[in-house]
Amino acid sequence: METTTEYTVLEHHRCTAVELVDAALRAHGHRVVSADGLLAVASGNRLATALLGALVRPAQQYRRYEVALSATPGHAVLTLRHADHGAAVVGGMIGANRRREAWHRVASLVETTLHGGGILLHRTDRIDTSGITLR
């Protein structure tokens, strides 16, 4: 199961929040593409990870995230979630553990960046249950 993290900021700071997160992710070696309130974030080498799995150095393991912005009256929410990697790039148990550790580093980086900018109101972690069927 994947985790989704939501960061609540004041509505009039939403652009600042996106800019801060964009700059922080780029500074930590991620490739970031911005479009319409969504940041597509990637790092590592997809081909090497697909071919070599856990043999790829941890820094080169392919990862993708999305940071989406949504606004409601009074506040805005930045949502950090995993983007589709495909099963080929997970790298087995070792790759999955590395991916989870990288997730925690990125989530902490975003939180620290927003907190340091003085605009973070609240952080909420959610478990993605979209793939679970209830009977």
Image: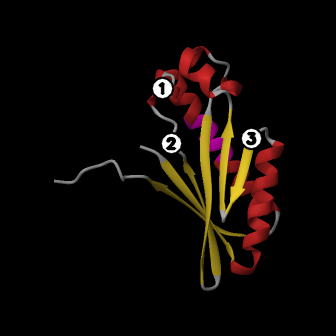
Q: Residue tagged by mark 3? A: 30
How dense is the environment of label 2, judged by Cα within 10 Å: few (below 14), some, or many (20 and up)?
few
Residue at image position (47%, 23%) is 93
Give the alpha-carbon distance from disc 3 to disc 2, as whole Å: 16 Å
- Asked if the residue at tag 2 contacts the one at tag 1, i.e. Cβ–Cβ closer than 8 Å, the answer is no
Residue 103 seen anywhere in this rendered image of the structure: yes
Q: Residue 88 carries which label?
A: 1
Q: Is residue 57 above or below residue 97?
A: above
Residue at the farthest bottom position: 73
Q: Is label 1 in a helix, a strand or a loop?
A: helix
Q: Identify the image quadrant of residue 15.
A: bottom right
Q: Is residue 87 left or right of residue 33?
A: left
Q: Position of residue 109 (x, y in %)?
A: 73, 49
- Count of marks, rendered view: 3
Residues drawn in magenta? 100-106
Front residue of this view, candidates 98 and 19: 19
Q: Residue tagged by mark 2? A: 84
Q: Is residue 26 above or below residue 134?
A: above
Q: Is label 3 in a helix, a strand or a loop?
A: loop
Q: What residue type is labelled 2?
A: Asp
Residue at image position (80%, 59%) is 20
